[in-house]
Structures are given as structure tokens and as C-alpha cells.
């Protein structure tokens, strides 16, 4: 018997109970944390940290108890030796590589898309040599593509399979970043990025979340990270006004609870401005975040 809209309305309470049971079992599976307990590993883009040379920045980050360094992807193949030297003998590892590739994966012209793929492969090779968790990629910023969502998605999935194979060979991955609608309308929510990762089905393709964009686009930080689940391999930290966490009223507790529930063990990295003296304000932000992580652990 075919069900129509009326049958769904009448059977709503039964369907609701079934859905709730399904959600419950998935959450329980994710809570089992196959990779061990979640960990708050703090990282920063190099531009946020004070210091003239990279080695000075790294020394400062180590002294502040940080664990990761995020660098830009532009010119990365020529910077591998320099970055390795700056990190040698310190506890700091390369976290993610931020963009820096040519053109746009969803450019209207196929030859532009090929140019983008070639450029990403070069950066991914360098990212692999540095042991990075992945290259951050925005499929299309506003104004970069005239493709409709319906046209763009299968093109993206095809290209991601190819780039993902290369990333996997290099021991790293590509990380899709959802942005807010003011910057990129194509990909705005973590669940959508996770759905693309699921369809691509390639270990060389994962995703990230950025607390600044999430404040604009998500209804729940916790729900967004649960939807991202196994595909989530990087997080950007910024407040509601895109300055350091703790410099306004943005809470990280719900999001951190979500990260704890999925057993997240990759980096959380500053991508933000700083109000005031960086030498004073960055350690304050780190203490604030560690405290928010503990508050999230206390949530039931
Ligand atoms: Mg970001």
C-alpha cells in the first residue's frame, strides 16, 4: 500500500519514535570513540602568533602549551625545508594547510577546474611531506562560479575522488570548509560537507568546521559536529566577531561537547584577529578554551 501525505501525518508519532531510536543508536556508536578519548589539541595559523621569524613563533607556541601550526598553502612546495627546520626539536606539528591553490574547483570553465586540481596536487604533495592533517579547500567562493548547486555537486564529487586519490598517496587529505553565506553560498553547513564526503567515499577527502561561520549558519554546534562525525579532521577557532575566543560572548561548550562525543583528536586552530596585546591575549584565550573544554566534559 502506497502512503500519502495524510498517512504520514497520522502515523507521525510512530515514525517519530522510530527516528528517535535511529538517532539514539547512532549517537551511542559515535560515543564509543574507536580512536580513544577526544583531545583538545590547540593550534594557530602562523599569522596570529607574534614573532619575526617562524622559529620564534613556534618557540612561543610551545611555551604556551600549543601543539599545532597551520600555514598557508601558497608556495608551500618551496617552504617544506624551512618549516621542517622551524619545528625540529619542538613539540609543535603541522596541523592543516590553509588554501593557497590556483583558480576554483567549481569554475565555469573545465580548463580552470583542471588548473585548480593540478595546483592542489602540488600543495598536497608538500602537505604530505610535512605530515599535515590536510589542505583546506573552499569549493567556490561567491562570484567564482555560475554553476547551479545541481550542476556543481556531481562535478565536485568527481574531482574530489581524483584529488582524494592523490592526497591518500601522499598520506594526507583534502578538507572541505563550509563558510557563511556572505562568503560562499555553495557549501555552508557541516552536515552538507559530511554528505559530500560520504558520497565521495575516499579517505583522502574529509572536512572541517569553523566556529565563526558555524555561529551564522548552524542551529546547533553540537549537532553540526555530530553530523560531521568521522569526516571531521580540523576545526577553526574564532569568536562571534572573528577575534580570539573569549573576547566576546561566543560559547564553545556545546561545540566542544560534540567534539568529545565523536572522539575528535585532530587540531583546533586559531583563524581570527586579536584585540589588544597578542602576548597577553593569546594565553588568555588558550586558558578560556581549556576551561570551556572542561565545562563540556561536565555536561551530561
Ligand atoms: Mg576558517
Image: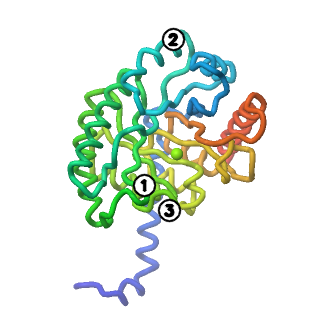
Q: Earlier in the sequence, mark 1 or mark 2?
A: 2
Camera-nearest residue between 281 and 144: 144
Q: In which quarter of the image is residue 294?
A: top right
* Left or right relative to 235: residue 117: left
**Residue toward you, 20 or 216:** 216
Query: Vertical placement of 13 versus 108: above or below?
Result: below
Closer to the camera: disc 2 or disc 3?
3
Label 2: which residue? 88
Whether pointer 3 and pointer 1 mark residues with C-beta atoms closer than 8 Å, the reply is: no
Q: Do the residues labelled 1 and 2 touch (CB within 8 Å)?
A: no
Vertical relation: 179 (above or below) 168: below
Residue at 38%, 21% (x, y): give it: 78
Q: Distance between the residues labelled 3 and 1?
A: 9 Å
- Spot occupied by residue 80 in the image (x, y as percentages of width and height): 41, 19
Q: From the viewer's perspective, tell me whether residue 14 is left or right of residue 240.
A: left
Q: Is mark 2 within 8 Å of ligand 1?
A: no
Disc nearer the start of the sequence (3/1): 1
Judging by the rendered image, the residue that carries numbered circle 3 is 181
Rounded to the nearest angstrom, the CA distance separating label 2 from label 3 is 40 Å
Q: Tell me the distance, in whole angstroms, between the alpha carbons under discs 1 and 2.
A: 36 Å
On the question of residue 145 being in view, the answer is yes
User: Which residue position holds label 1?
Assistant: 141
Instruction: Tell which circle, 2 or 3, labels the residue nearer the N-terminal end.
Output: 2
User: Mark 2 falls on what kind of element?
Assistant: loop
Q: Which residue is drawn at 37% across and 90% down?
A: 6
Amino acid at each position: 500500500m502506497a502512503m500519502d501525505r495524510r498517512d504520514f501525518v497520522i502515523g507521525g508519532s510512530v515514525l517519530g519514535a522510530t527516528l528517535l531510536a535511529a538517532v539514539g543508536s547512532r549517537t551511542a556508536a559515535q560515543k564509543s570513540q574507536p580512536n580513544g578519548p577526544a583531545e583538545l589539541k590547540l593550534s594557530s595559523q602562523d599569522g596570529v602568533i607574534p614573532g619575526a621569524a617562524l622559529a620564534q613563533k613556534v618557540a612561543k607556541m610551545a611555551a604556551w602549551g600549543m601543539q599545532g601550526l597551520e600555514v598557508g598553502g601558497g608556495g608551500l612546495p618551496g617552504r617544506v625545508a624551512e618549516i621542517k627546520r622551524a619545528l625540529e626539536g619542538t613539540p609543535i606539528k603541522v596541523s592543516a594547510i590553509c588554501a593557497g591553490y590556483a583558480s576554483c574547483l567549481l569554475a565555469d570553465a573545465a580548463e580552470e577546474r583542471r588548473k585548480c586540481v593540478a595546483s592542489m596536487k602540488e600543495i598536497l604533495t608538500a602537505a604530505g611531506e610535512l605530515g599535515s592533517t590536510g589542505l583546506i579547500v573552499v569549493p567556490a567562493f561567491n562570484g567564482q562560479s555560475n554553476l547551479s548547486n545541481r550542476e556543481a555537486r556531481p562535478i565536485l564529487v568527481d574531482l574530489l575522488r581524483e584529488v582524494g586519490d592523490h592526497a591518500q598517496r601522499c598520506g594526507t587529505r583534502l578538507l572541505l570548509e563550509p563558510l557563511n553565506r556572505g562568503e560562499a553560498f555553495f557549501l555552508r553547513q557541516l552536515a552538507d560537507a559530511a554528505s559530500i564526503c560520504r558520497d565521495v567515499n575516499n579517505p583522502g577527502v574529509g572536512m572541517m568546521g569553523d566556529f565563526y561561520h558555524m555561529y551564522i549558519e548552524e542551529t546547533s554546534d553540537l549537532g553540526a559536529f555530530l553530523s560531521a562525525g568521522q569526516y571531521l579532521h580540523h576545526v577553526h577557532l574564532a569568536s562571534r566577531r572573528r577575534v580570539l575566543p573569549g573576547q566576546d560572548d561566543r560559547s564553545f561548550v556545546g561545540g566542544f561537547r560534540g567534539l568529545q562525543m565523536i572522539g575528535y583528536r585532530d587540531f583546533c586552530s586559531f583563524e581570527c584577529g586579536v584585540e589588544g596585546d597578542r602576548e597577553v591575549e593569546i594565553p588568555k584565550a588558550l586558558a578560556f578554551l581549556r576551561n570551556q573544554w572542561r565545562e563540556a566534559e561536565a555536561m551530561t
